[in-house]
Amino acid sequence: MNVHLNPVNEFRMTRPDDGIARGAPLLVADNISLSFGGVKAITDISFDIRKGEIRAIIGPNGAGKTSMLNVINGFYHPQEGTITFRGERRSRMRPHVAAHQGIARTFQNIALFKGMSVLDNIMTGRITLQHRNLFWQALWNGPAEREELEHREAVEHIIDFLEIEHIRKTPVGRLPYGLQKRVELGRALAAEPALLLLDEPMAGMNLEEKEDMSRFVLDVNQQFGTTIALIEHDMGVVMDLSDRVVVLDYGRKIGDGTPDDVRNNQDVIDAYLGVSHDA
Amino acid sequence: MNTQAKFGMGDSGSRAVDTFPKFLLANAARLGSRPAMRHKDLGIWQSWTWAELLAEIRAFSMGLAALGVKRGDKVAIVGANRPRLYWSFCAVQALGGIPVPVYADSVAEEMVYVLNHAEVKFAICQDQEQVDKLLSMGDELKQLTKIVYDETRGMRDYDHTDLHALDGVEALGEADYEANGDKNWLAEIEKGKGSDLSVMLYTSGTTGRPKGVMLSFDNLVITAKNANAFDRLVETEETLAYLPLAWVGDHIFSYAQHYTAGYCVCCPESAETADADRREIAPTYFFAPPRVFETLLTAVMVRMEDAGPTKKRMFDKYMDHARKVGEKILNRESVPFGDRLKYRLGEYLVYGPLKNRMGLTRMKVGYTAGEAIGPEIFSFYRSLGLNLKQLYGQTEAAVYITAQPDGEIRADTVGKPSPGVEIQIADNGEVLYRSPGVFVGYYKNDEATKETKTSDGWVHTGDAGFFDKDGHLKIIDRAKDVGKLANGNLFAPKYIENKLKFFPNIKEAVAFGDGRDFCAAFVNIDLTSIGSWAERNNIAYASYQELAQHPEVYKTIEEHVDQVNRDLASEALMAGSQIRRFLVLHKELDADDGELTRTQKVRRSFIAERYAPLIDALYDGSKEKYIETEVVFEDGRKGKIRATVEIRDMAEHEPAFAAAPVREAAE
């Protein structure tokens, strides 16, 4: 007898279905090139991120990983190439538009509001989902209050999910680094993203914190079905977590495929080990 | 109100309420709309009344029956203090099954042993972590057939052939209830008797394998009722469930007493939020091991150090006053009117807000047990007007052996025998007891049962103790550690060490004397406390060793040892084992060097071997001794510490207890 049921009270992302099937490309980068003056940060890179997968972007320092993320969420505008997100082609986009379209991210250097509580920080992640205008917000009683309660409930689910109940009211600046990273993930999740960009979520963490964070990343992917693009230096983490890996070096793509493909790719090995192999 | 009427079910007065499922039915009828349980979920306290509790447990229980749980089946319960895990006790017992709570933090290998030994067929787990642990043991779990889990996170992709979500099980039971009613279920409850096995609790064996202590419904119900009467606990109490489910104390406080008294148990949001949740609930009945009270006090003191000068002065002034009269007022002794008035003012200005901060505002009765509590910490809470008491108990006794009655509270005793408990002291000083709470036996371990429990029902505690002149029991040490000095005087090392350790300046102490002429001790200074003293007094030091050897430090420790001797002199049994010589150790005792156990207990025999030259020096009359000790650094490297350690002689105090027997004779 099998009595497994989907429990009714489980938190779900409310973003409307975009009609893209699981496994179909959610985001496609086409021949992207980006330069700052004479410096070529990214040269002619193409890859895709499929819906529901965890996609890792790896490469040595200065390979252009963070630039790539910045292109995806519209912070940098590539000189050449286009980004197609949810079937919509665009070459220039501003970050707030990306946020509204469902791209959320965390940063390499934590970018939280240090003086605000964990709860308030995560609440800010809901801003793109709040609809009452300044007038109603200022009046607060009534519609804005109801709206806030709804969002607060969603935030509480995220707090529960990330197991940070005990620091709900603590100012972020007082928290240790590992927890701040978790709060940042919480804020990104609060936006109920279709695509979640994580820029080195485990940098500077100890082993236990890394294990926790890995579990959260996997759980986000499984429970909410969120597509994740991840930059990470810890190869163990990347190989364990991700479904597919794209490898950059000096702004060029040198590998793309499953973790196993990439692990055995000679170009990738060379890029990491700096071996010059004889022709 | 007479208890029989109080707990009777009304419809048929003769039917005894002697099992927890029967109490559930009785409570749902009698206290239907009163809160039975609370749980903070998503930041909001959710409550269940007794009537709702009955509905939940009935659904869950009938669901378990559908899964195949039958009379006599053992069901493991693994997880933290969550309402549904508490419900599972009753849900299993209603079917005649026996719940076996397991420590959630035990590693897989330990769990395998317990689950196999208990022949567990079903397991109810809190979340993925616990399920993973059980699944990782695979075929090693010979009897386990099905696992039920509470939290669904991360569980979606598991193979659900033998794995069931608790929601699903409840839905199954609910459907059965709607279709067929609860006649069979009630009949099953009716079959339960007081003499049936209620629960199996595995004692965390410090030596050897854990043993499964079998407790019957009678054991728990009678003990819990006695305890409720002793402290006048009724259905309006609220408690916070935050200690491990598998621990007998939690089983009594958060389950047995909860059902028998009908009070409300509150489950915190998570283990880390227990402190904040306690503030919100303000329990009326509260249990905590000494370390919780210690941490709470330290937190207050640290915050007060940072407070503004006005607040600090006010705090100091009124705390001084509380120390002077607070305990007397609590004990209903006579206190001058002026002092009472000042205490009232203090309550308004300092004690009240402080108690609120600690979440103890409504506390009617509080208990601490498990180990000795520092007298200063104990009287700090007492002086605030908090009725904090001590008790002494064991898993084998369903907790209560002794407890302090109101108004007879002292820091150094564990109180008088609890209602229904008989106590006798064996010739070797070991405490024996007999009570309605005495366990049925160890599961599948008759040998150990025979060793612990005599044929006429007396149980060996393994602890040595004695009754003082007021009839209060004092526990001095583990019976096997108690020895005798060469002159025949009793020597209880831990008793002496604890007295030394209550001084904040002393971190650790090791007493010697078994079979020797007199008692002598090693002392470890507390670097935090002595270090800050050195800082205030401009005493420069480069290392622990240097500070430990400082003449001023020796002088301070000497005063402490002298005070301990004075205390010992006032106790008939202990006066002979005053500390004649002591030394301050040049290095901190450390678990990495094998001198302490991982739980920070002194490994006496190991230390005796390692510091043999120092012990010889304690007894050969020399003034100092050179010693070389090998140490292991945190990174695993080894090094040597060399030092010449000074040894001090102490004067013995005249025994000062002589007056006591005379007074007793005069009474």
Image (cartoon, coloured by chain):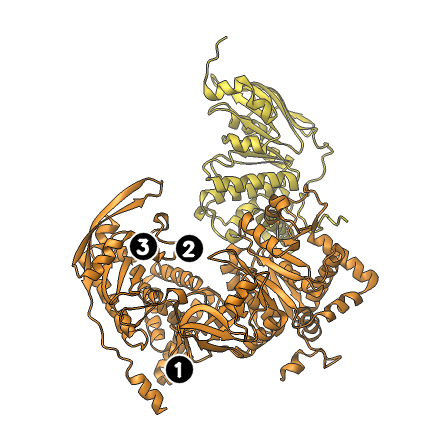
Q: Answer yes or no: do the residues labelled 1 and 3 have beta carbons within 8 Å?
A: no
- Indicate the position of residue A117 as horizontal and vertical percent values: 50, 50
> Vertical placement of A279 versus A217: above or below?
above
Q: Chain of mark 1?
A: B
Three-letter amino acid code at the position of disc 3: Ile
Q: Residue at x 27, y 73 (%)?
A: B576
Determine the colour of chain A. Answer: yellow
Cα–Cα span, label 1 and label 2: 34 Å
- Indicate the position of residue B633 as horizontal and vertical percent values: 33, 43
Please tell me if label 2 and label 3 are on a single chain: yes
Label 2: state its secondary structure.
loop
Three-letter amino acid code at the position of disc 1: Asp
Which of the marked residues, 2 or 3, is nearer the chain's N terminus? Answer: 2
Relative placement, left or right, of B91 versus B305 is right
> Vertical placement of B48 versus B626: above or below?
below
Q: Quadrant of residue A227?
A: top right
Q: Chain of mark 2?
A: B
Which of the labelled discs sits on residue B607, or is there none?
3
Neighbour tally class for label 3: few under 14, some 14-19, many 20 plus, Cα within 10 Å: some
Which of the labelled discs sits on residue B576, or is there none?
none
Which of the labelled discs sits on residue B470, or is there none?
1
Cα–Cα span, label 2 and label 3: 16 Å
Q: How many discs appear? A: 3
Q: Chain of mark 3?
A: B
Q: Residue at x 19, y 60 (%)?
A: B620
Taking the view exactly as shown, the residue that stands out farthest to the left is B623
Please tell me if label 1 and label 2 are on a single chain: yes
Neighbour tally class for label 1: few under 14, some 14-19, many 20 plus, Cα within 10 Å: few
Please tell me if label 1 and label 3 are on a single chain: yes
- Indicate the position of residue B80 as horizontal and vertical percent values: 57, 56
Which residue position is annotated with label 2? B599
- Indicate the position of residue B574 as horizontal and vertical percent values: 31, 73
